[in-house]
Image (cartoon, helix red, strand yellow):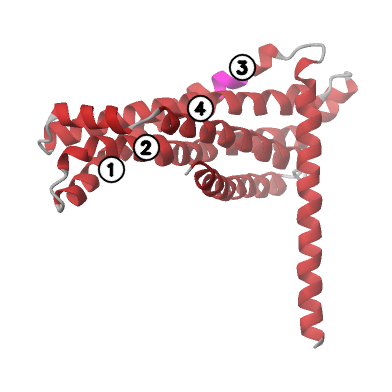
Amino acid sequence: MTAMVNTLGLMGRNFLLMLQRLGDIATLSASSLRLLVASPWQGRHIVMQIYALGVGSLVIIAITGAFTGMVLSLQGYYTLAKFGSESLLGSAVALSIIRELGPVLGALMITGRAGSSITAEIGIMRVTEQVDALEMMAINPRARIIMPRIIATTLSVPLLIAIFDVIGIGAGYVVGVDLLGVNPGSFVAEMQAKVTTEDINTGWIKAVSFGFLIGVICTYIGYRATPTTEGVGKATTQAVVITSVGILMLDYILTSFFL
């Protein structure tokens, strides 16, 4: 009986701690985003973060998109050939990438490359007391550190995922048409017929949501990191894991909503 009570107590404390952290995340992010229109405007820092996150992640997004499209084309052809429906390969590749694999895989790769960098960078600012220095100079650290990174991820992730989609579909076309012998007209025609505006909008909404999630979680964990070398390493690991799980959970919710 005592063990059960202790277990329930531990579960309750963990649940309350989770609610407290969620409230802290919402409060910190909302208060930071309100500073978007405050003076002085941080447009220069937003552009710098978009460049650092977007251009820095471009190569890994291109490579991931190309191999995703090639694998989808190979696997899709193998499956469709069993039913004599090889002509549907174009629509299968395009829909899979636009609705699911593009946003999810792209966001996961950006989390590993850029999200971890955001958390580590902010955590190091804590260790080296750069955040305290900003406050001493009457500069709001949330306006200079948190808000530009949230805006940057929200804007740059959809653009990177759009590049992922284009490269993935192009790579799928090359493999399907040149390697597997699918009729190029059928590949393109089926893709045009089956992919609708709703599918594209679904992919965009997911991309924007994932970008916002990456920015919010990674900046929060970095900002609240323990100001030690070990604390920064632990915070970086937590940011990648929590953000990746959050992307998968949010993807399920959004997919259920748009079906």
Instruction: Say the numbered circle drawn on residue 48.
Output: 3
Please tell me which of labels 3 and 4 falls first in the chain.
Answer: 3
Query: From the image, which quarter does the N terminus lie in?
Result: bottom right
| Residue 50 is covered by the magenta coloring | yes
Three-letter code for the amino acid on which mark 1 is drawn:
Leu
Q: Which residue is mark 2?
A: 97
Measure the C-alpha gap from mark 4 to mark 2.
Answer: 14 Å
Q: CA distance from mark 3 to mark 4?
A: 17 Å
Asked whether the beta carbons under mark 1 and mark 2 sit within 8 Å of each other, the answer is yes
Q: Would you identify the image quadrant in which residue 111 lies?
A: top right
Q: Which residues are magenta?
A: 48-52
- Mark with earlier residue (1, 4): 1
The residue carrying mark 1 is: 72
Kindly identify the amino acid type of the residue bearing the numbered disc 3: Met
* Real-space Cα separation, disc 3 to disc 2, in angstroms: 29 Å
Residue at mark 1 to residue at mark 4: CA–CA distance: 21 Å
Q: Are marks 3 and 4 in contact (CB under 8 Å)?
A: no
Q: Position of residue 192 (x, y in %)?
A: 28, 27
